[in-house]
Amino acid sequence: MKPFCKILMLQIFTMFLNTCFSQQRRIDSIRIDIESLDTESFYDISCSDFDNSFRDTKKIKTFRDRQTLSDFNISLKGFTLSKFKSIDVRGKITIYGDRLEKYCFGQFAQFYKDGKLYFNKKLLILILEKVYGVHEKYLDTLQNHE
């Protein structure tokens, strides 16, 4: 009986640790504001200039279904620091849930938040597939390089 109690206590302790330390973010909805990645501009568009620059041409899409939110939650874990030094913004993603998060993104899978540039190819592919139904083929071979 003792080994059974030890195993049971170990399982209870493991469940407690998993509950405490593997908290998942709660996502209620995601809003994507996006301009075509093919759109050219005379200068790099910053996050603060995005709304004014593409006021009449950007596409807005909101997602609330559980499967799509789950797909985004998985992709949001794939950020690495970007080797790019600047970003030409073509979209914004706003995540509503237990905390509000906003990222700007460019055509080469760079994401900007809180003064830092990140790289996340899977997230950009997911965004394009959810908004347009397809993604640009160059993204399949895109790498985080200088």
Image (cartoon, helix red, strand yellow):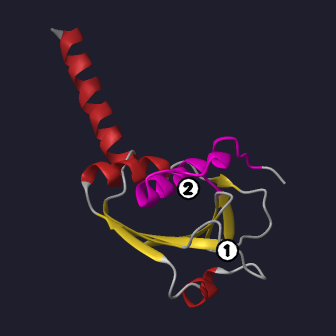
Q: Which residue is mark 1?
A: 115
What residue is shown at x 26% (from left), y 26% (from top)?
11
Secondary structure mainly formed by the magenta segment: helix
Q: Dot 2: what SS?
A: helix
Which amino acid type corresponds to the residue marked 2 in the rendered image? Leu
* Front position in the image: 127 or 58: 58
Which amino acid type corresponds to the residue marked 1 in the rendered image? Gly
Query: The N terminus is located in which quarter?
Result: top left
**Residue 131 visible in the shown view:** yes
Note whether 71 is above or below 15 in the view shown. below
Residue 23 spot, x, y in % from top left: 36, 50
Inter-mark Cα distance, 1 to 2: 19 Å
Q: How many marks?
A: 2
Q: Is residue 108 left or right of residue 69?
A: right
Note whether 26 is above or below 12 in the view shown. below
Q: Which residue is mark 2?
A: 124
**The magenta stretch spans which residues?**
119-144
* Front position in the image: 75 or 116: 75
